[in-house]
Amino acid sequence: MTKVTSNYLFVSLFILLFGTAGGSAMTRKMAPGNDELGWSFFWCWLPACLLLFLCQCLVFPKARTRLLFQLVFNGLMGFTLLFFLLSIILPVFWLSPMDMWSKVVLAAIFAAILLYNLVLGWQTVHRRWADLAAPAFEQAFKPKNGSVNWEQVVRKMKIQPEIILPCVPAKWTAAVWIVFIIGMIAGLVMKSGWPAFSAFSWSIPVMLVSACFNQFSGAFFAQALKVRAIEKERHIVLPSCG
């Protein structure tokens, strides 16, 4: 696991601001002559991104010295990538001709998908800890200096996030993605005449891909919880790795 440095914070801030500015520009471009929509997107999304960055800044000092906070920090960095991809999707809510309740329902569906992926990453760690990770921890732990090769522990769990298609049988997954790709191409062709269709044809696949990053965050947060339990049980403080 790579050691946490200040470069991570700078990269995170750049990605968050770039996503916010890019989403605002997309909104203005898809709604010519209506700059207010673009600025409303910018000022609505910016506080959320800055709040995430503030959380990363608060965790950062301890992330450089303690494994527990290093894992939490890595989970928060996963949210940076999620927020960036959401910046591409959110203009749909500003531009769509749907009524407010339809937008609320769609937002709730997207939120449920994000939460499901977060929980899935969390559960993966819990399912594989006792049989795979716990024995690996005993091998990687060095009692003399109280450190552990956490990368060795994580490799045993073989955490491999995948893109989830809710309510779609596995045998239909390939066909569904072909439909998505065709829809995305059609959306590009018809972006002038049917901007709403174009926006949705891209937003749904991007949402499913972005939700995958939540599996990484969920897995990191679950690992942090395991580290905390080990520290309490053994009365130790595990240093950060890298």
Image: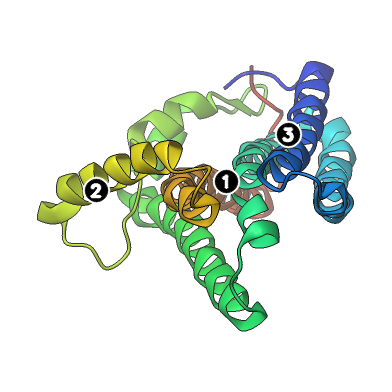
In the image, 182 versus 126, the foreground residue is 182
**To which quarter of the image does residue 108 belong?**
bottom right
In the image, 235 versus 183, the foreground residue is 183
Inter-mark Cα distance, 1 to 3: 24 Å
Which mark sits nearer the N-terminus, 2 or 1? 2
Q: In the rendered view of the protein, which quadrant contains the N terminus?
A: top right
What SS does tag 3 mark?
Answer: helix
In the image, residue 80 above or below residue 37: above
Disc 2 element:
helix
118 left or right, relative to 136:
right
Q: Earlier in the sequence, mark 2 or mark 3?
A: 3
Across and down, in percent, residue 222 comes to 55, 52
- Residue at the location (77% across, 42% down)? 24
Instruction: Give how far across and how far down residue 73 sits, in percent.
Output: 72, 38
Left or right, 20 with respect to 104, comes to right
Kind of residue at badge 1: Ser
Residue hosting label 1: 217
Disc 2 marks which residue? 179
Q: Residue 213 in the image: x percent, y percent?
A: 51, 42
**Amino acid, disc 3:** Gly
Q: Amino acid at mark 2?
A: Val
Instruction: Categorize mark 1 by other alpha carbons within 10 Å: few (<14), some (14-19), many (20+).
Output: many
Q: Which residue is mark 3?
A: 22
Q: Residue at x 34, y 50 (%)?
A: 128
Which label sits on residue 103? none
